Image (spheres, grey):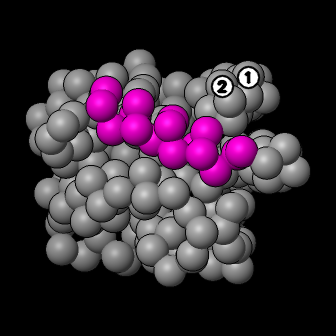
């Protein structure tokens, strides 16, 4: 099953990303508000490209482009709440722009790899992050909240859609490779954010 294979293949890369400075501080609740806004601002072009391409690309299972997974509007709402109406003036790193350009050039099934990297993380660990964000900043948790039927059910449906995507071995291998590359792009993004505040 592709979902399980993706989890196994990306486990080490996932751990590396979690130990990046920005994410480690976020998980500890010590990432200050400004730096959290810089993080969200740099995720914005990535979600904008991913969600636009997911809707436009044919041949993807519906569970990978379920409108209830979309995070862009919630991300913008949190930036408005935590930073203010001028959030778009926050700088975007070259790493985020490169990732955005990469996504804009992708088609199915490889877009499914990046949907896996972002959405399954949002549905799983993102719920823990939502509690941390609420404790740290007192607001700005729309990004971490999913509508009914809730994160657990949406995650289960998402995994089933991944398995449907990977029915052919050649497709599975390509998606796994692309997901690994997606985690590498996240590592580059978080490394670019690290010098912002030490």
Q: Does residue 97 appear to the left or right of 153 in the view shown? A: right
Numbered circle sitting on residue 107: none
Q: Give the range drawn in magenta.
A: 152-167
Residue 8's tag is 1
> Which label sits on residue 4?
2
Where is residue 95, by image quadrant?
A: bottom right
Q: In this view, does 50 lie above or below 88?
A: above
Mark 2 or mark 1, whichever is nearer to me:
2
| SS type, badge 1 | helix
Query: Residue 132 vs residue 120: left or right?
Result: left
Residue 187 lies in what quarter of the image? top right
Question: Quadrant of the image for the C terminus?
Answer: top right
Dots 2, 1 in contact, CB < 8 A: yes
Residue 39: image location, x then y, percent: 45, 52
Which residue occupies 25% across, 65% down? 73
* Secondary structure mostly taken by the magenta-highlighted segment of the chain: helix
Residue drawn at the location 50% of the way across and 80% of the way down? 56
């Amino acid at each position: 099953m592709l979902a399980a294979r993706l989890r196994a293949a990306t486990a080490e890369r996932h751990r590396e990303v979690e130990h990046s400075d920005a994410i480690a501080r976020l998980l500890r609740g010590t990432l200050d508000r400004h730096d959290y806004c810089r993080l969200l601002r740099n995720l914005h072009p990535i979600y904008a490209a991913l969600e636009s391409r997911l809707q436009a690309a044919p041949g993807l299972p519906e569970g990978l482009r379920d409108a209830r997974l979309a995070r862009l509007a919630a991300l913008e709402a949190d930036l408005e709440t935590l930073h203010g109406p001028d959030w778009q003036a926050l700088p975007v790193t070259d790493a985020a722009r490169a990732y955005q350009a990469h996504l804009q050039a992708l088609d199915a099934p490889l877009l499914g790899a990046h949907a896996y990297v972002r959405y399954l993380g949002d549905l799983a660990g993102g719920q823990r992050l939502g509690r941390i964000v609420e404790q740290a900043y007192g607001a700005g948790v729309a990004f971490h909240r999913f509508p009914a039927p809730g994160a657990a059910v949406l995650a289960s449906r998402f995994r089933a859609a991944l398995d449907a995507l990977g029915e052919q071995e050649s497709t599975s291998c390509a998606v796994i490779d692309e997901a690994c590359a997606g985690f590498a792009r996240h590592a580059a993004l978080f490394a670019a954010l690290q010098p912002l505040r030490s």
